Image (tube, rainbow, N blue to C red):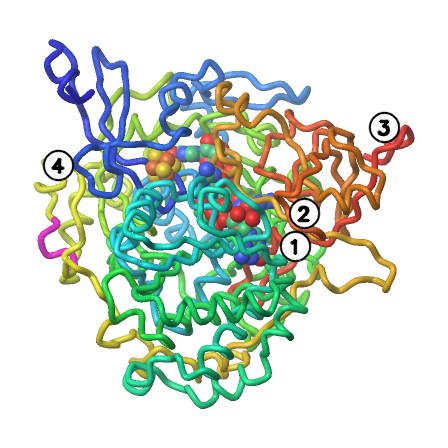
Amino acid sequence: MTRRDEYRTKPGVRVITGACPHDCPDTCAWEVAVEKGRALDLWGHPGHPFTAGRLCGKVDRYLERTYHPDRLRAPLRRGPDGAYSPISWETALAEISARLRGILDDPQYGPEAILPYSYGGTLGLLQGEGVAARLWNALGTSQLARTICAEAGSWGHRYTTGRPIAMDPMDFARARLILIWGSNTLTSNMHLWPQILAARKQGARALVIDPANTRTARAADEWIPIRPGTDAALALALMHVIIGEGLHDRDYVARHTLGFDALRERVAAWTPARAEAETGVPRARIVRLARAYATTRPAAIRLNYGLQRHRGGGMAVRAITCLPALIGSWRERGGGLQLSSSGSFHLDKRGLERPDLRPDPAPRTFNMIRLGDALSLEPHIRARALFRPRPVDPAPTAADAGPPVKALIVYNCNPAAVAPDLAAVRRGLARPDLLTVALEHFMTDTAKAADYVLPATTQLEHWDAHKSYGHLFFALNRPAIPPVGESLANSEIFRRLARALGRREPCFEEPDEQILERFVAAQTHPSFRSITWARLLAEGFARLDVPDPYLPFAEGGFPTPSGKCEFFSQTMADDGYDPVPNYTPPAYTERASATDDALCCISPPAHSFLNSSFVNVERLRRRERAPCVFIHPEDARARDIDDGASVILESRVGRVELPARVSEDVIRGTVLAPGIWWTSDTPDQKGINELTPQDETDMGGGAVFYDISVRVRPTTSSDAAGPA
Ligand SMILES: Nc1nc2c(c(=O)[nH]1)N[C@H]1C(S)=C(S)[C@@H](COP(=O)(O)OP(=O)(O)OC[C@H]3O[C@@H](n4cnc5c(=O)[nH]c(N)nc54)[C@H](O)[C@@H]3O)O[C@H]1N2
Ligand SMILES: Nc1nc2c(c(=O)[nH]1)N[C@H]1C(S)=C(S)[C@@H](COP(=O)(O)OP(=O)(O)OC[C@H]3O[C@@H](n4cnc5c(=O)[nH]c(N)nc54)[C@H](O)[C@@H]3O)O[C@H]1N2
Ligand code: SF4
Ligand SMILES: [Mo]
């Protein structure tokens, strides 16, 4: 008997369907057993083909997180002594709206002095940007470019294939060769693994290209270690071999790609020997890999965002995205590539987010990865934080800076842990004249810096709807339990705030369920034809109305200007880029001198956390033990670092102290600090993003979390009393 059957037979227990809200490609559908308003259990929906009845180890603990004793239960106000005391919603909203109105009405400041700041706490269409966007549009506040995760790769992907469209992840089961490229699949995309296992049962090989011997690399057939940020060099050399040996699909290339001659000319110089010097992958292995990839059919690539958190990340994704078109693997079921499937969802969000309410000209846009700069009172520093995604966009000057940010409204995000240059973020948040409001579940590092902390509901307590960036299903989330404590859904908090600010538009009266019902009804794209509100209420989720099997580019039809996969992109030339795939070396390789012994620091996801979420769930924290940094034995020996010893990592912008774990599971020249811990768990009360500069990737203004030059040395007695 399944858990569902078991609970359904119990009197007084109801089973309610929902969806995981987290920033994860798997977008699982779940079921929750509820008795007398209390959730008893939660599990993966057995009827959802991708979820297949299982949740990950983190969300298996979602009830512990929801009913955690530290869950925020009432609005909090920080007093002059720094201590927080509970206040009523009426008082909180009256005081916050009075402060905001002061800013809005002051001719020195105005609406642009308010900065909303949010990211992936929930990816829900409603509790994410839905009602929030209505309010920011209506007020005309500064806008936020949400660049912290995937921007470089998304631009590189779009320039090449037009939209982020992927092969159906279920079809990985039919591949014969699978390249897992910059993805720790077992950690960050675990529901793809059964498909990969099914393929291997049929004789497929799975190869992992990663600087670290991750749990995925250990479970796969081969680990191909690579220096961080050099993947474009590898891709160019693979194309060098494939074209040089005539292994490309001439027919597919002729009919469905643009710029083959330019590509051939470019990769001619990318011999495997040259790529070996950049990537550290031996030339013979590059040749073997190229031949295997071009001749094993079908061949699939799972590319993830890990490899685009480098200076040249956009170009790297662009170069890799050319591969399936070159060998024609889009033709076959089980062939192609997956980075993101989000481009298969053609959602019309106009009614939901109301961009029509936004003033014209549009207010300024800040790049979220430069929050530290954005909060500066110096116009020339603030101007650096204005969003400038392409080289052709003029570099803003102090004259463009606009008013200082006087109010920061944070929701679904923990910038005091996840954003680059934490010292700059901290300086900004500490400004006495800055009003900071945080909508949260817990007292995160960001909430601890806020003037007002407003308790938000979790996914068990509110309505929402979800697309996916890792498969083709749309999902509805129904509330299963009443709000914990006095918490309110983001949507309700923003509606109440809108009314407290005197907004009378009917869109701030509309209840959640009705907003979602209207949103679903407003979708006119053919892929939504059979997805109705009634069906979502009855079934909980629905596959997009796209063909099954889904072979998006078997016959070409790329949504690019030319309708082809663009090896040559005129749009890129117009945007100020090299129009043909190229290699931009990572920033950390620019050594100050020949004797410089700097290493590259990367900090990919910890298995049991989701970015900085779940760190406070006791059982998950115990599983991750403690913050640490992995270092290769030779790098450790050269620096007199013993396993377990405390070390100092220093970058251009900051320093942190961590215990070292000496291990061959990370390549020489790279150190790896897993996960984003809360500062309360770290030896020096400093998060890993102390080290990350506010530098931007080549495309889209993304963050360079894995392209940091650091010096690593043992901690000495003088460090204890060292600079703060
Ligand atoms: N458990 C868990 N799951 C998560 C998350 C989490 O924090 N924890 N985060 C979620 C989020 S926000 C996202 S964006 C997604 C995807 O998140 P991703 O950041 O793509 O996560 P990973 O799959 O861990 O991929 C990172 C892998 O890339 C490797 N890597 C780093 N630099 C390079 C490089 O230059 N080249 C190559 N080839 N590899 C490199 C790292 O060693 C790591 O194994 O995962 C989501 N899922
Ligand atoms: N060094 C380093 N830094 C990184 C990364 C890395 O790999 N290394 N990864 C980057 C990536 S890929 C990403 S996507 C970002 C992620 O950065 P964030 O989007 O900030 O993700 P989380 O750290 O999970 O924080 C989300 C917060 O939202 C809250 N939250 C969840 N649901 C709700 C809700 O319904 N309402 C409200 N009000 N709050 C809610 C949670 O409690 C949590 O504190 O971090 C980036 N930072
Ligand atoms: S975090 Fe990802 S794998 Fe885990 S339950 Fe949510 S969607 Fe599924
Ligand atoms: Mo992300």
* Residue at point 16%, 43% (across, down): 517
Q: Earlier in the sequence, mark 4 or mark 2?
A: 2
Instruction: State which quarter of the image contains the C terminus.
Output: top right
Label 1, label 2: how many angstroms apart (C-alpha)?
A: 6 Å
> From where the camera sits, is residue 409 visible?
no
User: What amino acid does circle 4 point to?
Assistant: Leu
> From where the camera sits, is residue 170 visible?
yes
Task: Identify the magenta region.
Answer: 527-531
Instruction: State which quarter of the image contains the N terminus.
Output: top left
Q: Is residue 241 left or right of residue 682?
A: left
Q: Earlier in the sequence, mark 3 or mark 4?
A: 4
Kindly indicate whether the residue at mark 1 contacts the one at mark 3 (C-beta within 8 angstroms): no
- Category of crowding for the residue at label 3, using alpha-carbon neighbours closer than 10 angstroms: few (below 14), some (14–19), many (at least 20): few
| Front: mark 3 or 4 | 3
* Residue at point 11%, 9% (across, down): 11
User: What amino acid does circle 2 point to?
Assistant: Asp
Question: In the rendered image of this protein, does residue 646 appear above or below residue 70?
Answer: below
Q: Which residue is mark 2?
A: 421
Q: Is residue 369 left or right of residue 339?
A: right
Extreme residue toward the right, this view = 718
Identify the element where label 3 is drawn.
helix
- Category of crowding for the residue at label 4, using alpha-carbon neighbours closer than 10 angstroms: few (below 14), some (14–19), many (at least 20): some
Q: Earlier in the sequence, mark 3 or mark 2?
A: 2
What x and y, as percent, mark residue 432?
A: 68, 36
Identify the element where label 2 is drawn.
loop
Residue 694 numbered mark, or none = 1
User: What amino acid does circle 1 point to?
Assistant: Gln
What x and y, as percent, mark residue 33?
A: 22, 19
